Image (spheres, grey):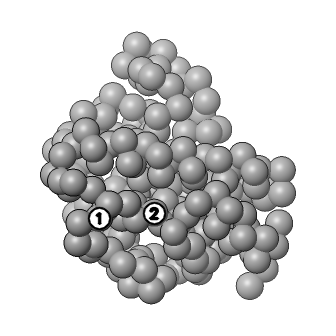
Amino acid sequence: MTEDKLLNQAELCGFDHVCIIETDKLIFDSRFRQFCEMNYCGNYDNNYSCPPACGTLEELKERALKFSRALVLQTITPVNDIMDDEETKVIKHRHNEMTWNLIHKAEGELLKFLPAMAGPCGLCSPCAKKEGNPCRFPEKKASCLSAYCIQVDALAKVCGMEYYCEGEVAFFSLLFFDGKK
């Protein structure tokens, strides 16, 4: 799939902003792992895509940097209260569903790719880890940008996208891939 076709397909999936960057432009900051360890979302050590099961920062960074390019996907959605977890969870879920929809459309045309989502993997509910079973879809599980320790505000700046949106929430996901420059 050409990069132009991938960008076009992402726009057709409904993303507000899309951009392709070189992966060497990503900033990884180990301090973001603490947000996972605080277990704010309740998935720390309860989801195969979350720490510690997903791997160390070094392992995730190595996985990501095996790819030369990353498709950056952003949605911006109005919210009544950005601090309302229930409201933002619904919006985040919609963003991730859009990302999976794009992945399904591109799957046959991208030889290798790696998604990074706007939150923990939600392919199975509950995650098999909670039941003490192996991951049902190890080839499809996708860790979140926090697990990768990607500095999203810097990513937004590189892409010319907004990060802080008054009265709106911006969610990001990435699709790492190799492509022609």
Compared across the picture, whether 59 is left or right of 90 comes to right
Which residue position holds label 2? 75
Provide residue 58's location: percent of width, then percent of height: 42, 59
Task: Tell whether label 2 touches label 1 (CB within 8 Å).
Answer: no
Q: Counting other residues with Cα less than 10 Å from the Cα at mark 2, is it few (<14), some (14-19), or many (20 or more)?
A: many
Provide residue 16's location: percent of width, then percent of height: 51, 69
Of residue 65 and residue 14, the one placed in the foreground of this image is 14
Of residue 53 and residue 137, the one placed in the foreground of this image is 137
Q: Which picture quadrant has residue 171?
A: bottom left
Quick one: quadrant of the C terminus? bottom right
Amino acid marked by disc 2: Thr
- Identify which residue is drawn at 48% across, 83% down: 159
Q: Which mark is residue 77?
A: none
Amino acid marked by disc 1: Glu
Q: Secondary structure at mark 2?
A: strand
- Up the image or down, 103 lies above or below 161; here it is above
- Up the image or down, 73 lies above or below 107; here it is below
Earlier residue among tags 1 and 2:
2
State how far apart marks 1 and 2 are (Cα). Answer: 10 Å
Q: Secondary structure at mark 1?
A: strand
Of residue 18 and residue 158, the one placed in the foreground of this image is 18
Compared across the picture, whether 144 is left or right of 142 comes to left
Provide residue 100's location: percent of width, then percent of height: 61, 46
Which residue position holds label 1? 168
Quick one: quadrant of the N terminus? bottom right
- Identify which residue is drawn at 32% across, 60% down: 78
- Identify which residue is drawn at 41% across, 53% down: 118
Compared across the picture, whether 165 is left or right of 84 comes to right
- Identify which residue is drawn at 52% across, 80% down: 24
